[in-house]
Image (cartoon, rainbow, N blue to C red):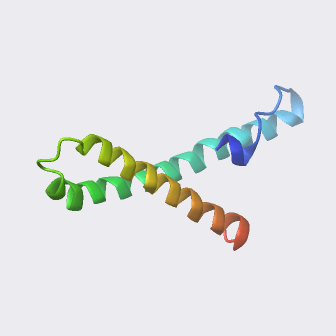
């Protein structure tokens, strides 16, 4: 989120404090939405697919970690396409 929103604004007083509050709200709001989508996808894939496939595999934690990273990369790419290329978000 820091990459998208940029550096945190300098602490200020008065009217400029409103921009700081909007920045913090956007940071938390967008982060929670994207994080919950990633978590939901991972839980669904883990419950319905990975539990059956990875029962007796020794490196199942590494495989689950790689799948979680790949889901995060796909979500980041989809978010970038929708925000910058298609301009939907």
Q: Position of residue 28 (x, y in %)?
A: 59, 42
**30 w.r.t. 81: above or below:** above
**89 w.r.t. 34: above or below:** below
Instruction: Determine whether, in the image, residue 59 is placed left or right of residue 75.
Output: left
Quadrant housing residue 12: top right
Quadrant housing residue 83: bottom right
Tell me the quadrant of the picture where the N terminus can be found. Answer: top right
The residue at the point 64 percent across, 67 percent down is 81
The residue at the point 66 percent across, 46 percent down is 26
**55 w.r.t. 74: above or below:** above
Q: Residue furthest left?
A: 56
Q: Position of residue 56 (x, y in %)?
A: 11, 47
Q: Residue furthest front?
A: 58
Q: Position of residue 39 (x, y in %)?
A: 39, 50
Q: Position of residue 13 (x, y in %)?
A: 86, 26
Instruction: Determine whether, in the image, residue 22 is placed left or right of residue 75.
Output: right
Quadrant housing residue 7: top right
Tell me the quadrant of the picture where the C terminus can be found. Answer: bottom right
Q: Nearer the viewer, residue 22 or 73?
A: 73
The residue at the point 24 percent across, 42 percent down is 59
Q: Nearer the viewer, residue 82 or 14?
A: 82
Instruction: Determine whether, in the image, residue 32 is placed left or right of residue 10.
Output: left
Q: Nearer the viewer, residue 43 or 11?
A: 43
The residue at the point 69 percent across, 74 percent down is 86
């Amino acid at each position: 989120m820091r990459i998208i929103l940029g550096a945190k604004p300098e602490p200020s007083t008065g009217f400029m404090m409103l921009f700081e509050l909007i920045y913090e709200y956007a940071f938390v709001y967008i982060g929670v939405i994207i994080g919950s989508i990633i978590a939901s996808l991972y839980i669904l894939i883990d419950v319905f697919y990975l539990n059956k496939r990875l029962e007796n595999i020794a490196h199942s934690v590494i495989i689950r970690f790689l799948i979680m990273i790949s889901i995060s990369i796909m979500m980041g790419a989809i978010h970038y396409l929708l925000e910058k290329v298609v301009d939907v978000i």
